[in-house]
Amino acid sequence: MLRIAVPNKGSLSEPAAEMLREAGYRQRRDSRELVLPDPDNDVEFFFLRPRDVAVYVGAGTVDVGITGRDLLIDSASEAVEHLPLGFARSTFRFAGAAGRLTDARQIAGLRVATSYAELVAAYLRERGVEPEAVVRLDGAVESAIRLGVADVIADVVETGSTLRAAGLEVFGEPILRSEAVLIRRADVDQPAGLDTLTRRLQGVLTAREYVLMDYDVPLHLVDDAVAITPGLESPTVSPLHNGEWAAVRAMVPRSQTNRVMDALYDVGARAILVTSILACRI
Ligand SMILES: Nc1ncnc2c1ncn2[C@@H]1O[C@H](COP(=O)(O)OP(=O)(O)OP(=O)(O)O)[C@@H](O)[C@H]1O
Ligand SMILES: O=P(O)(O)OC[C@H]1O[C@H](OP(=O)(O)OP(=O)(O)O)[C@H](O)[C@@H]1O
Ligand SMILES: [Mg+2]
């Protein structure tokens, strides 16, 4: 039975549960449940603090887990990234008082507050920058400068509104681009059942990223239309009963749906229909 660690709280928890549900797994109804067997799918879920997921996976006490790339790196555990999951996207950045600093090298001799002390210390070490101290805080890191425990901070930035509200500005290159990732232990044989979990999650990612597009097009324009919708491998083209038109079906990136419909209409396609994909195996 594959043991899967899932964040029990925070930004990762709800989208992780939603993705697993879409992949056909049971998910807990009560947020206090810590263990959830799913015998029909031969897996067992363990709901753990997001920061602890990589620790358990690295120790081998659970087989795989869902966490953030930033948390995985900060944990310095023996776990590795297996599959990026496309949600909880963020950047990890240095920030300070507006207009004060422009480059990470200027952090030499300063105090940096962060909840990701390992990640920040390693980043500065690799660049030969020696801060006075890396101050480890649990959260609300944006207040550390105003309250006098640090000169700069390093934290998760998504929209930037928390930084703005604290009167801070990012500086230097992004330290990291993070998103939720499925992790597994390094240097051991793949646990039984990981292939199935991976295929199911990839199916959810594809179903979210693509739509199915159907349209009719005169036979002499099929090549022009198919050039606009090449599909993943090759679109399905079927004859219509009238003998002069074809029906075409292809997968199209969801983000391009309307642009592709406009282009198809312009080359002469009609009856263009778009359908969401509920699940798939590619
Ligand atoms: N505002 C955000 N947008 C996107 N991802 C975020 C955001 N805040 C945190 N994350 C991501 O969530 C993960 C951190 O999980 P964690 O649950 O510890 O943080 P959190 O969402 O800040 O929860 P809490 O502060 O309630 O403990 C990291 O991978 C981080 O990149
Ligand atoms: O760029 P934004 O869209 O504003 O998001 C980033 C903020 O979200 C998270 O904070 P959270 O709400 O989890 O509080 P915390 O600092 O207590 O963890 C993160 O630590 C940042 O502070
Ligand atoms: Mg937080």
Image (cartoon, rainbow, N blue to C red):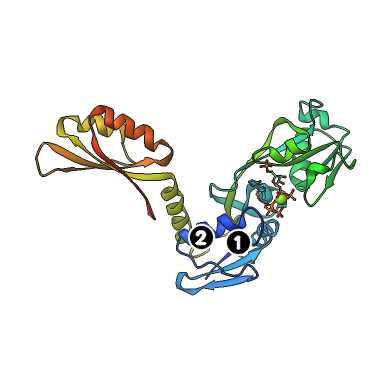
Q: Residues within 10 Å of mark 1 (few under 14, many from 20)?
A: many
- Relative depth, front residue between 192 and 223: 223
Q: Which mark is residue 116?
A: none
Kindly identify the residue that appears in the image at 31 percent across and 29 percent down: 263
Q: Residues within 10 Å of mark 2 (few under 14, many from 20)?
A: some
Kindly identify the residue that appears in the image at 17 percent across and 39 percent down: 246
Q: Is residue 197 left or right of residue 163?
A: left
- Relative depth, front residue between 132 and 180: 180
Amino acid marked by disc 2: Leu
Q: Which residue is mark 2?
A: 20
Could you say where residue 116 lies in the image, as x and y percent from the top left? 75, 47
Kindly identify the residue that appears in the image at 45 percent across and 63 percent down: 24
Q: Is residue 106 above or below residue 66?
A: above
Q: Is residue 221 left or right of residue 228?
A: left
Could you say where residue 193 lies in the image, as x and y percent from the top left? 48, 64
In which quarter of the view is residue 219 placed?
top left
In which quarter of the view is residue 102 placed?
top right
Q: Helix, strand, or loop for circle 2?
A: helix
Between marks 1 and 2, how big is the CA–CA gap? 10 Å
Amino acid marked by disc 1: Val
Q: Which residue is mark 1?
A: 6
